[in-house]
Image (spheres, rainbow, N blue to C red):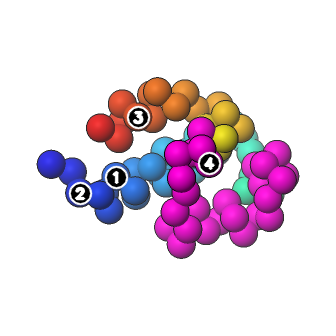
């Protein structure tokens, strides 16, 4: 079974990779979410956990299918 920490790390990687594939900077993603850049940086660096709703919002902004993300993480 995959550990919780491994899943969190994979979540961060998938979100970061999706952001980069979308050619978006942390600043641009943060602006689209009306958040400071540090919000995105902390998520990507594992300094901040995000809840389900925040995950869905991030997926939408970076063009990542939330259902695909769930499949990857389970």
- The numbered mark at residue 7 is 1
Q: Mark 2 to mark 4: distance in Å?
A: 22 Å
Q: Mark 2 to mark 1: distance in Å?
A: 6 Å
User: If you read the primary sequence from the N terminus, does the residue marked by circle 3 or circle 2 appear first?
Assistant: 2
Residue span colored magenta:
29-56
Q: What element carries label 3?
A: helix
Q: Are marks 2 and 1 in contact (CB under 8 Å)?
A: yes
Q: Nearer the viewer, mark 2 or mark 4?
A: 4
* Badge 1: residue crowd in 10 Å (few <14, some 14–19, many ≥20): some
Q: Mark 3 to mark 1: distance in Å?
A: 10 Å
In the foreground, 41 or 58: 58
Write the residue at 64% across / 44% down: 58
Q: Is mark 2 on a helix, strand or loop?
A: loop
Which percent across, then down, holds residue 17? Answer: 55, 45
Q: State the residue position of label 3.
A: 70
- The numbered mark at residue 54 is 4
Q: Do the residues labelled 3 and 4 touch (CB within 8 Å)?
A: no
């Amino acid at each position: 079974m995959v550990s919780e920490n491994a899943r969190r790390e994979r979540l961060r990687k998938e979100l970061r990779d999706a952001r980069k594939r979308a050619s978006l900077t942390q600043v641009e993603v943060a602006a689209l979410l009306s958040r400071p850049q540090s919000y995105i940086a902390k998520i990507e660096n594992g300094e901040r956990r995000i809840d389900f709703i925040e995950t869905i919002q991030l997926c939408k902004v970076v063009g990542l299918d939330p259902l695909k993300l769930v499949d990857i993480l389970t």
